[in-house]
Image: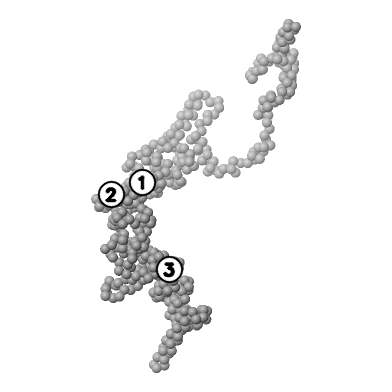
Amino acid sequence: MDSQFDNADEHYWNRSSRAAFSFDDDDDDIDVADGHGAARASAGHTKLSTKHENNAIFNDDTISEASFDNSAALGTLNHLSIKAILSDEALQLVLQEQTLDDHVMPKGVTPEEELKLLRRQIQSTLYSPNLEATTQKLLHGKVAPLEMFKSLLEKQQLLDKALANGGDAVIGVLLFLKRTLNTTQFHGILEQRPKALEHYLSYLRQSGDLSSYIETLQRFGRHQEAALQQFQAAMACSGIAARKQQLQRLIDAYAKAGVGVIPLYEQVFHAALKLQLLQEKEGLTHQFGEHATPIELLYVCCAQNKNWKDQDMLKVTSPQRFAADQEISPAQYEWTALNERAQAQAYADLECIFERVSTWHPLKSRQFHISFDLALAVQRLFELQAPATVLQLFLSKMSNSSEKLALAQRVKCIKAVIDAMVSLKQQQELQQLRESLPERSEEQFYCENALKSLQSKRWTTDNIKLKL
């Protein structure tokens, strides 16, 4: 029985249908003239195909990609021109970018021809840089080799092209120029291109390189901006002692330099140093913190002041003394004091804030004086819910009767409305107003007296005219 199986196996492997399969494309070994061999090969192929059909695991492997008909899916795209998708300018940029990135060799070239093509591509990439393609890549956030721009002229042209396109490409080119040029050349390029200088300063400020930012400002003669930036940095220090130290250094540095900063800034530096000393000595930081502004500290001084009629100018926390030391304008002082006193409902002090003694006539009584628009004061007092008597006091200082009438009606101050109508001699309007007021109210009596006064003045004027 074993010999029978051996003969069967030997017969199986000797059959032509079980010949070894080869992927070679050579057909030389096939004997076309041998009809029996061809018939046996055909029969073997038929049996092999039948077996593969019965075995599903081989079904996918027998399908060729070339036999897949995708003409129906691409039928629409075959009739669509590339110009309908990309403009000529965009297509040109794509082709230019491919010349920089893609180094695809055509098929069938000899090694000598391939070497020539590679040399030509390296020559065009490294020694003939494309400005438009490089700036476009930088503009879209792609990596572009900038080392190909060797000469100073090529670098200047690259920067000019980046400035024309804008965006983050300018910063990338500027940092490349700073790295590859000396300081004199780099500053010369920035001096000739103010737009590039602004981009560079903006980058330094946003990146937090404060020392380079201030140094660049001073290098190009912008001392006022540099001084302001140094002052802001000094005031941003944490702790009164650190701020005092930085302000003193700033004052000493500009005192030795002698030029470069306007006197107003020097006054600001000194005032800030005085402010730090005052905060440290008087402890005025409990309400607004260590970084309180001069106006906020003035508000604290106003709250602590007890005598508004005759302020003690020898006391450093006196509102007037503090405003003078900190170079606070009269309008800011009056506005701050008005808000603080109105919120504290200390309305009796308001008149003292706006009283001034005439400098040319010291013996004359004090007069009302306000350094900002009187209408703003009335509107602010109305917002802070000041009584009608306070509103009438400020409205009575207005000289224009028409504006006074409109503002009094807006803040609903009836007595001021009546006074304005009397000034405008609106007798009929006064009578209509009297009818609309509550019976036997204070405003109605005030309106009736105003009508009598207006009629009396009119009768007296008519009498004078008859006698004449």
Name the residue: 35% across, 72% down. Answer: 368
x and y percentages locating residue 377 in the rendered image: 41, 68
List the residue tagged with mark 3.
381
| Residue name at image x 73 percent, y 21 percent | 51
The amino acid sitting under disc 2 is Arg
Residue behind mark 1 = 210
Rendered image quadrant of residue 361: bottom left
Badge 1, how many Cα within 10 Å: few under 14, some, many 20+?
some
Callouts 1 and 2 close, C-beta under 8 Å:
no
C-alpha span from label 3 to label 1? 44 Å
Q: Residue 150 in the image: state x and y as whole percent.
A: 39, 36
Q: Are marks 2 and 3 in contact (CB under 8 Å)?
A: no
199 shown above or below 339: above
| Foreground pick, 44 / 381 | 381
Residue 299 at x, y percent in the picture: 37, 61
Which circle's residue, 1 or 2, is located before the other in the chain? 1
On screen, 414 above or below 340?
A: below
